[in-house]
Image (spheres, helix red, strand yellow):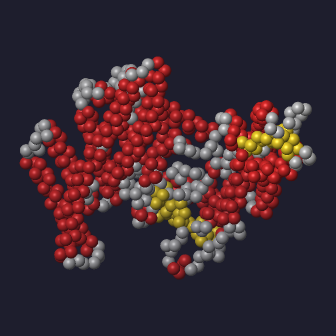
């Protein structure tokens, strides 16, 4: 794992047109080149270049691939991973053949699907009538007992099938029974009239008819369920027989799409092909060797170091271990870091887990989160086709980390499902919240002090990371005079020192040392000169001149804004970490409340209250702690050093993770 974003190089290569296809396959298999358009050449050279499109459009290939995917999914078939594609198996496209195969399969599958749809409608109707009978809601069903004067009951049954009605033919003394839903009476009445239906008024026959209808519904439900399952098996079997052929088509289409995507960045002369793209420096030799090998050495390759290019044009490749992927997604959701700056992922992982552990410190509940994360992760691995719901695969991975953090926090604070079953390694959180003391922690104010110190450490770390980023970018002016630069950091440090001295004095006075006066006044004066110095540097770079009044007004306003952001902003950012203590105290208070409620009862009810209480705390407090940890990272930590102006490195290849 790199502490900074990966160094990049810009490749520009020329190969003979005859070796273009081999080079495309080689680059696709390597998957390391983030292509750019050749648009920085002189206009007279650009005029000599042409682009070529494939005979089959990429959109057509993509549409055909989606058709194949739709068929495979009907057969519960997992699509091959992109990484498993083999460039050596690339074959010419036979779009007409693919279309004929899919049309034939789709026609047969549609017939089976229509039959499945009919079975599902029958099953829904049967289950609905069974539910009404079971719940005693007979007003929703239409039960009739009688005889047909002409025609066969079977003919009536066939016509009632679309609406889920049933007909039980009379035998001996038992009359014929017709059962349907009351809402379909407008369809049932004309049908019965057509077959000369005569209604029976025998109450006993009505009761017996209801019993016979209930038994018939039960047997019909089993038969329809078997029919539906059999149809699904037919669908799966049919697709399984064509599985290898369909997978082969899918792979070939995907390979051609990727090759076409690469070639869309190529420009051509009469005999040569020109292309360019960004590559991580550690892969430059591998990429060059692949191009030379594919072209038989008949190529010209030039490398441009990223340092000679504008920083905002260089794509950003972040190398983080797979174990940190949930935290990498947090960074990606926020923005892409600027090229050459700190990789935020490891710092986010540590800060997020520490915040969560302080807010949700319970070893028992953390173990539950760990189990949910482990079982959820295994479930998604076992069933890749499973549709993601509230617990996504990434969230399940994150829950494993959060569960471990909660377990450690619970051991530090002696909390196991809200009970101090084992002695705390640090201090007893419950005992302090309930008004007692534990070791050096005498009250909740000491807990608030711990989280404020933690916030100071996080903010201080963010400032140091910002200074490192600015030093690497050689932005000396911003490094020294920005609110998040050295001057702002100095004032933050002085404020922290003065604040702790104020607390130590019993909230009576600030430090009397003359150092405090100079430590504040000198940076404030330096900040006042920031606007004037900035204007002077801009003029040296050739910017337009401004009047003296405008310069003075702009500088003073910028100075006032900087002072406001430093003195109020840093204070607000620091105090914001009190929410860590607040949620931790709320978590303990809820557990104490549920324990008191359980103590008022006994036996099963007491256990049930504790189980429900823990479940609610895990769901609500766990969600709240996760959100607040993310918020503190985004708004209190990232704002100190994360610029988020980067362009993501997105190579075209068989690898799905461009960060590798």
Q: Is 423 located above or below residue 287 in the figure?
A: above
Please, which residue is most extreme toward the front here? 201
Say which residue appears at 85% left-offset and 44% top-offset.
Answer: 198
**Quadrant housing the N terminus:** top left
Question: Can you give x and y, in whole percent of width and height, for residue 402 in the image?
Answer: 44, 37
Say which residue appears at 68% left-offset and 57% top-offset.
Answer: 66
Q: Is residue 431 left or right of residue 103?
A: left
Q: Is residue 612 visible?
A: yes
Question: Can you give x and y, in whole percent of width and height, for residue 261 in the image?
Answer: 62, 63
Pick whichever, 420 or 313, lies toward us.
Answer: 420
Please, which residue is most extreme toward the top here? 603
Pick whichever, 629 or 353, lies toward us.
Answer: 629
Question: Can you give x and y, in whole percent of width and height, for residue 52 in the image?
Answer: 65, 72
Q: Is 519 located above or below residue 227 in the figure?
A: below
Q: Is 229 located above or below residue 429 in the figure?
A: below
Pick whichever, 18 or 122, lies toward us.
Answer: 122
Q: Is residue 342 left or right of residue 11?
A: left
Pick whichever, 570 or 602, lies toward us.
Answer: 602
Question: Can you give x and y, in whole percent of width and height, for residue 488 in the image?
Answer: 23, 54
Q: Is residue 416 visible?
A: no
Say which residue appears at 85% left-offset and 46% top-offset.
Answer: 197
User: How many badges with numbers are in the image?
Assistant: 0
Say which residue appears at 14% left-offset and 56% top-offset.
Answer: 522
Quarter location, residue 100: bottom right
Q: Is residue 140 left or right of residue 108?
A: left
Quarter location, residue 145: top right
């Amino acid at each position: 794992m790199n502490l900074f974003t990966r160094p990049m190089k810009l490749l520009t290569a020329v190969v003979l047109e005859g070796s273009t296809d081999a080079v495309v396959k080689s680059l696709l298999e390597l998957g390391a080149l983030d292509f750019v358009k050749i648009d920085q050449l002189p206009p007279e050279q650009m005029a000599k270049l042409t682009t070529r499109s494939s005979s089959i459009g990429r959109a057509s290939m993509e549409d055909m691939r989606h058709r194949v995917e739709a068929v495979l999914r009907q057969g519960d078939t997992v699509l091959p991973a992109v990484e498993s594609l083999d460039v050596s198996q690339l074959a010419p496209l036979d779009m007409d053949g693919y279309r004929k195969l899919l049309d034939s399969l789709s026609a047969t599958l549609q017939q089976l699907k229509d039959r499945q749809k009919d079975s599902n409608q029958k099953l829904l109707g049967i289950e609905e009538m069974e539910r009404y009978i079971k719940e005693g809601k007979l007003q929703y069903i239409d039960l009739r007992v009688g005889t047909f004067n002409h025609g066969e009951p079977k003919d009536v049954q066939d016509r009632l099938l679309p609406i889920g009605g049933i007909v039980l033919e009379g035998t001996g003394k038992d009359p014929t029974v017709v059962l349907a839903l009351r809402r379909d009476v407008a369809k049932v009445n004309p049908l019965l009239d057509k077959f000369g239906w005569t209604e029976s008024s025998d109450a006993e026959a009505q009761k017996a008819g209801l019993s016979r209808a209930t038994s018939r519904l039960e047997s019909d439900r089993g038969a329809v369920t078997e029919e539906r399952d059999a149809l699904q098996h037919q669908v799966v079997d049919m697709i399984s027989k064509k599985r290898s052929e369909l997978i082969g088509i899918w792979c070939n289409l995907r390979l051609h799409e990727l090759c076409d995507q690469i070639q869309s960045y190529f420009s051509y002369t009469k005999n040569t092909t020109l292309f360019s793209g960004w590559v991580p420096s550690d892969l430059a030799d591998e990429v060059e060797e692949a191009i030379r090998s594919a072209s038989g050495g008949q190529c010209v390759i030039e490398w441009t170091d990223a340092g000679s290019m504008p920083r905002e044009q260089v794509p950003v490749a972040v190398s983080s271990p797979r174990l940190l992927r949930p935290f990498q997604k947090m960074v990606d959701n926020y923005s892409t870091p600027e090229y050459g700056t700190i990789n935020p992922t490891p710092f986010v992982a540590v800060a997020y887990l520490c915040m969560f552990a302080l807010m949700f410190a319970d070893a028992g509940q953390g173990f539950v989160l760990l189990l949910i994360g482990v079982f959820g992760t295994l479930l998604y691995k076992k069933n890749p086709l499973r549709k993601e719901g509230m617990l996504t695969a990434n969230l399940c991975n994150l829950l494993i980390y959060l569960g471990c953090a909660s377990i450690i926090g619970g051991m530090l604070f002696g909390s196991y499902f809200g009970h101090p079953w084992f002695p705390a390694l640090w201090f007893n959180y419950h005992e302090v919240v309930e008004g007692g003391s534990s070791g050096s922690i005498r009250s909740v104010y000491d807990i608030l002090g711990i989280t404020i110190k933690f916030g100071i450490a996080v903010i201080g770390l963010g400032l140091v990371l910002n200074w490192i980023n600015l030093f690497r970018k050689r932005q000396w002016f911003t490094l020294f005079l920005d609110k998040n630069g050295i001057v702002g950091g100095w004032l933050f440090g002085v404020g922290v020192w003065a604040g702790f001295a104020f607390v130590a004095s019993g909230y009576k006075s600030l430090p009397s040392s003359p150092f405090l006066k100079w430590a504040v006044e000198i940076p404030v004066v330096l900040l006042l000169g920031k606007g004037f110095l900035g204007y002077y540097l801009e003029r040296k770079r050739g910017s337009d001149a401004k009047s003296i009044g405008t310069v003075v007004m702009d500088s003073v306003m910028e100075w006032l804004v900087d002072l406001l952001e430093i003195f109020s902003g840093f204070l607000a950012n620091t105090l914001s970490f009190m929410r860590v203590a607040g949620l931790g105290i709320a978590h303990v208070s809820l557990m104490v409340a549920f324990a008191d409620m359980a103590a008022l009862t006994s036996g099963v009810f007491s256990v049930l209250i504790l189980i429900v209480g823990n479940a609610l705390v895990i769901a609500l407090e766990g969600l709240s702690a996760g959100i607040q940890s993310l918020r503190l990272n985004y708004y209190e930590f990232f704002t100190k050093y994360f610029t988020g102006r980067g362009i993501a490195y997105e190579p075209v290849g068989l690898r799905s993770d461009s960060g590798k």
